Image (cartoon, rainbow, N blue to C red):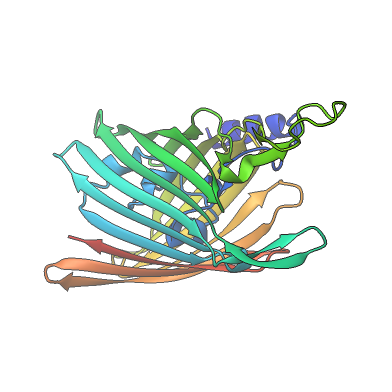
Amino acid sequence: MKKYIITLFLISTIYSVDKTGTTAAKFLSIGVGSNAVGMGEAYTSVADDATAMYWNPAGLSFYDTKEVYFNHSNWIADISFDYFGVTIPLDNRSVLGFNVTSVTMEEMEVTSYGNENTGETFRAADYAIGSTYALDFTDRFSVGVNGKYIQQTIANSHAKGFAFDFGTLFKTPFGFKLGTSISNFGPKMNMSGDDLLIGADVDENIDGNNESVTSILSTDDFDIPLVLRIGVSDELKLGSRNIIIFSLDAVSPNDNTNYINVGTKIKLLDGLISFYAGLNSLFLENAESEFSFGGGLTIPQILNNSLSIYFTHEQMKFLGNSQQLSISFNY
């Protein structure tokens, strides 16, 4: 099965077309969670925490624990990337989740032609608010869906939209897990707002007419970053209390060529301590991310609950490195 998936993926990569920079709401492609990013984003078939709402919604039903999850990343170019998620088991087969993703940055100066400072400032921010439902069909197979509202804002202009994420997760009789997900399936987005209002001369060939008729600049519609992921993972027990996880994801986005992510995670003392590492964007030409690594600690029995803290470093080629800090509270 693993050889079959990799072979098909490599064949499709040869004939794929580079569409870099052709989508709106690109923040939806930023990886969520220290565990997932630390494993090279090879998380589609792992998906064992609240970030499953991003990677594979089907994973929530196998992880039937109440959880509050917060993730903060000092991303590139002084951009703050944050994710908040809550999961609530409804019964022993289904789980409901809520999530918020935000990308914010400091105020920037407005400049005119010639790069002159006008004394004005503006802000830019992106948000996605979603709700997830996951269901176990059997003790081996689950499905999940996440619906989300999307908004991008820059100064006085904005774009709004919505999208859905779909996922399946299968625990095979052979021991390994197989996960699939389609993320960001939705209509195109375009910008609108007061910044697109301009004064225009309707007909420059006529003298004496109104040369400043209020007009609206028309903007193109852009697809959002649709992503297909297929992942496999397996576990190897090291003694009675330690586990090592190996995972691989084949990724096919609509705004770039295909690539592969690989990762591993070691869970010691029944998960009290963990270390992970991964390689991102293998076979992707001019990939920005090179590798990632990190670790975490779980503190059990805090008011009869558990608190987990994870940290990840992601090595970049050109734009500067990024770090992610995740805090999870299971109750």
Q: Is residue 290 above or below residue 53?
A: below
Among the 4 quarters of the image, the one containing residue 226: top right
Query: Image check: 70 left or right of 29?
Result: left
Which quadrant of the figure contains the C terminus?
A: bottom left
Identify which residue, 263 or 150, lies in the foreground: 150
**For residue 162, above or below residue 21:** above
Q: Position of residue 9 (x, y in %)?
A: 64, 33
Place of residue 196 in the rendered image (x, y in percent of width and height, measured from the top left): 63, 41
- Can residue 256 be seen in the rendering of this structure? no
Locate residue 94, reporting x and y percent.
Answer: 21, 36
Q: How many marks?
A: 0
Q: Residue at x 45, y 55 (%)?
A: 102
Residue sticking out furthest to the front = 208
Is residue 206 visible in the rendered image? The answer is yes
Which quadrant would residue 8 be assigned to in this image? top right
Q: Quadrant of residue 97?
A: top left
Residue with the most extreme right position: 205
Task: Give the residue at x 61% y 57%.
Answer: 279
Residue placed most toward the observer, 32 or 180: 32
Left or right: residue 201 versus residue 150 is: right
> Viewed as shown, does residue 59 lie left or right of 6?
left
Image position of 290 with respect to 19: above or below: below
Compared across the picture, whether 281 is left or right of 53 comes to: right
Nearer to me, 259 or 10: 259
Q: Residue at x 30, y 63 (%)?
A: 328
Q: Where in the figure is residue 314, as x and y percent of width and height?
A: 58, 65
